[in-house]
Amino acid sequence: MTVWIARRIIQSIFILIAMTAIIFLAVNVIGDPVETLVNPEATQAERQRLIEFYGLDQPLPLQYVAFVKGVLQGDLGTSYVYGESAIKVILSRMPATLELATSTMVLSVLLGVPLGLYSGLRPNALGSRVIMGGSILGFSLPSFWTGLLLIMVFAVYLRWLPATGRGETIEIMGIGWSFLTRDGLSHLALPVATLSIYMSTFVMRLTRAGVEEVVPQEYVQFARAKGLRESRILRVHVLRNIMITLVTVIGLEFATLIAFTVVTETIFAWPGMGKLIIESIEKLDRPVIVAYLMIVVVLFVTVNLLVDILYTLLDPRIRIGGSV
């Protein structure tokens, strides 16, 4: 297993190297940040000093070499807008995004898995038909429309919940968390509900499909013929065999939530990475854009590695390193 993990880590390093080149080139062909940074009334000498300060006067290959050196040292440049380390700017917004994504995924699993099990085990029941009909609606609604609708109902008309912001936070080890306060939870409710409507229906339909595939299998029928309790059959034979698919998809969807909650964070003015990247693109803050994309790449590579490791823990039939 150690050899296999080492091989996967080496593959991940090569992926990261390739992505540094792709991200750097893609970002550097977008616009001219000097036009955003320089005052329109600035002199040519002032413009030139700014260009030299950020190294934009260097040839692109030299800029890339400097970028790679910075990556190896944990330095992805200085934000043009904030005037501090781009990584520091991103990390300052990451707790808010992690809180939003984690809350969404926990709620989606708690709702989606039990409902998917019920509808898969009793596909012809009235409750199952209602659940599946509702899942089609939840699966089809765009998140921006859902978010605006929830704001209109619960924030504007009923005035039960706040529409924007993160609310009061409590610091733990220097990091502020809003789910630990009542005000923070009220601010968290609407964005989490917006993301969970889609995510929970996705998890539910995935669980149902897995149950419908596993239940007719011979080993499940044999377990019932032996007189095993339904709870044990469900736990040992059904859940265990659909768990690999669930872990794969839920892991990747969790990474997607962290990386791409841009629309929801913008609608609710949630101070996370998604809102930050929109602002950085508008202002052509290249170091922040590059730092964000690099963090996203590292996130997906790490999640894929963890999912592969979980495979072997959930299903011993999977052999590591190709051994049989």
Image: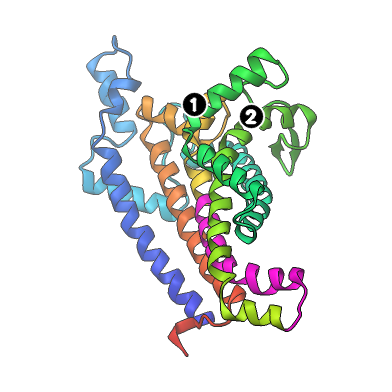
Q: Residue at x 23, y 37 (%)?
A: 29
Q: Is residue 117 above or below residue 183?
A: below
Q: Which residues are magenta?
A: 226-254
Percent of width and height locating residue 115: 65, 51
> Where 206 sits versus 126, above or below?
below
Label 1 element class: helix
Mark 2–mark 1 CB contact (< 8 Å): no
Magenta stretch secondary structure, dominant:
helix
Q: Which mark is residue 190?
A: 2
Q: Which residue is mark 1?
A: 145
Residue 193, position as x, y percentages in the image? 62, 34
User: Looking at the image, which is closer to me, 33 or 22?
Assistant: 22
Question: Mark 2 or 1, which is nearer the eye?
Answer: 1
Residue occupying the point 29% across, 9% down: 41
Q: Could you tell me if residue 136 is visible in this image?
A: yes
Q: Amino acid at mark 1?
A: Trp
- Residue 50 sits above or below residue 318 on the image: above
Asked if residue 277 lies left or right of residue 238, the reply is left
Mark 1 Cα-neighbour bin, 10 Å: few <14, some 14–19, many ≥20: few
**Pick the front one: 197 or 16:** 197
Q: Secondary structure at mark 2?
A: helix
CA neighbours of label 2 inside 10 A, class few (<14), some (14 to 19), many (20+): many
Q: Alpha-carbon distance for marks 2 and 1?
A: 13 Å
Between 31 and 157, which is closer to the camera in this rendering? 157
What residue sits 70% from the left and 73% below the top?
A: 233
Residue drawn where x is 29% and y is 25% of the image:
34
